[in-house]
Image (cartoon, rainbow, N blue to C red):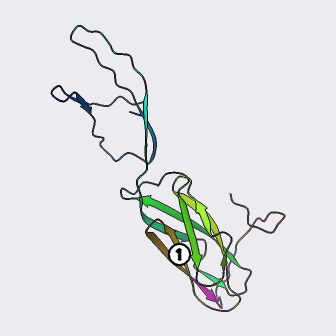
Amino acid sequence: MDEALVPSIFNPQTGIISYLPDNPLKNGEHTFYIEARNNNGNANWTKPAQFFLSLPPTNIRIYSSFSSLPADGLSSSRLEVAVLDYHGNPVIDGTPVSLDVSTGRLDKEFISTVDGWGIAYFFSPKHPKDAEIKARCQKVIGKFTIKCGPINNALARIAIRDNYHKPVDQ
């Protein structure tokens, strides 16, 4: 299974070969080969078989570079959105996630996952108000709140922007 030799069980009454992994398989493509010999020692031809596993999301977590921002309409925070299945594994690449915010703005309304992660940027509103950010994937919703208003602590952030003044991802 996926280039590793694994133990399997053959049921001669049903003709079924089965394998139960120790840990849940990750979402994505998997390959398996079956090598067998009959009672005379003759081997079968081995050919790979592939299958895809794509479990639905059950958990969305949103991480922000900052938990609070000045309400100036210019300050921004990088948002990292993690989308996980029931086993805590990342969902399959390309899983669409919609984003929404109660105030301020986002640089994109939709992201696609890569290794279970997606990235967007939040820009603060011009007037003080807490911003609730929601990420939705199928029926699962994750929420995070950024406080936007007067900031008593100094913030230090370096942002690299492209020619269109958009933040550049790492």
- Dot 1 crowding, Cα within 10 Å, few <14, some 14–19, many 20+: many
User: Seen in the image, is 71 located left or right of residue 26?
Assistant: right
Q: Position of residue 3 (x, y in %)?
A: 43, 30
Quadrant that contains the N terminus: top left
**Magenta-drawn segment:** 146-155
Residue 151 lies in the magenta stretch:
yes
Secondary structure of residue under mark 1 = strand
Vertical arrangement, residue 159 with respect to residue 146, above or below: above
Vertical arrangement, residue 12 with respect to residue 78, above or below: above
User: Seen in the image, is 33 located left or right of residue 109?
Assistant: left
User: Seen in the image, is 48 located left or right of residue 23?
Assistant: right
Name the residue rendered at 62%, 86% in the picture: 148
Q: Position of residue 129 (x, y in %)?
A: 61, 90
Vertical arrangement, residue 147 with respect to residue 63, above or below: below
Name the residue rendered at 33%, 21% in the picture: 35
SS majority, magenta = loop
- Which quadrant would residue 131 be assigned to in this image? bottom right
Name the residue rendered at 43%, 27% in the picture: 48
Outermost residue toward the front? 14
Q: Which residue is mark 1?
A: 134
Q: Is 158 or 59 nearer to us in this picture?
A: 59
Q: Position of residue 72 (x, y in %)?
A: 73, 86
Q: Amino acid at mark 1?
A: Lys
Q: Position of residue 38 (x, y in %)?
A: 24, 13
Quadrant that contains the C terminus: bottom right
